[in-house]
Image: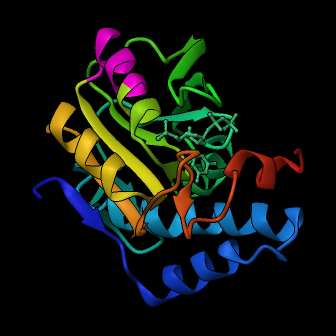
Amino acid sequence: MTNVTILDHPLLQHKISILRDKNTGTNEFRKLVEEIAMLMGYEALRDLELEDREVETPIETCMTPMLAGKKLAIVPILRAGLGMTNGILALVPSAKVGHIGLYRDPVTHEPHEYYCKLPSPIEQRTIVVTDPMLATGGSACDALTLIKQHGGRKIKFMAIIAAPEGVRKVHAEHPDVQLYVGHVDRCLNDDAYICPGLGDAGDRIFGTK
Ligand code: PRP
Ligand code: URA
């Protein structure tokens, strides 16, 4: 599939395996999600545009590349996407941060929007949407539609673990979005949880049940 990249660096795979372990506690889980987001962001942002700027070194003046264009926008999908934000901010500290609040109905598994605040203007920015879990793909697709309704165009979506169903849905409904995934798992279960997955990402990051 075009526009879908599986980031299978050994360090990422190792850290994702620790996330999966049900005995990994909240503190370690949260740190790992942040580290994984940073490692994924390092790869996913390798096409950021640069422009030469003049810098005076202690030796002489030179033209040297720096990030060009409008500041990056990071848009976590609440709640679990929040856990990935600081990892990407560590790479691009000047990024703006928007938020989209969605929760999945436990019975229908349909996403419901409860919050949306995005950096304005958003048209010219590279936008990185974060959510550790891409299950049915409903939340991702709704978030991407919302961002496009606000004018977003250059969009990347980062998920740590995805189900094949979610990857197919995002690719079908938003073929222009670059999707970065740490691992594509086997399937969804009857509750639309990813198998083997890691359970409920929001609960594991925030220590709720
Ligand atoms: C989880 C996860 C995604 C969504 C994925 O969030 O963080 O946003 O489910 O499922 P989908 O691909 O089937 O839409 P949840 O709705 O549980 O909310 P939370 O982050 O507040 O726990
Ligand atoms: N949301 C999660 O947090 N985990 C899943 O496996 C599916 C949706």
Task: Identify which residue is drawn at 52% across, 46% down.
Answer: 192
Task: Identify which residue is drawn at 61% across, 28% down.
Answer: 107
Placement of the N terminus among the 4 image quadrants: bottom left
Q: Is residue 53 visible?
A: no
Depth check: 115 or 98 in front? 115
Q: Is residue 105 magenta?
A: no
Placement of the C terminus among the 4 image quadrants: top right
Residue 137 location (% of width, % of height): 39, 39
Depth check: 57 or 3 in front? 3
In this picture, residue 15 sits left or right of residue 177: right
* Dominant SS in magenta: helix
Q: Is residue 150 magenta?
A: yes
| Label total for image | 0
Residue 158 location (% of width, % of height): 42, 51
Q: Residue furthest front?
A: 190
* Magenta-highlighted residues: 142-152
Q: Is residue 129 visible?
A: yes
Depth check: 112 or 86 in front? 112
Residue 162 location (% of width, % of height): 43, 58
Quadrant of ligand 1: it is top right
Instruction: Report which quarter residue 170 is drawn in.
Output: top left
Task: Identify which residue is drawn at 54% across, 26% down.
Answer: 108
Task: Identify which residue is drawn at 86% across, 62% down.
Answer: 26
In this picture, residue 203 sits left or right of residue 109: right
Instruction: Report which quarter residue 141 is drawn in.
Output: top left
In this picture, residue 79 sits left or right of residue 9: right
Q: Is residue 99 above or below residue 189?
A: above
Q: How is the image coloured?
A: rainbow
Q: Is residue 197 above or below residue 92?
A: below
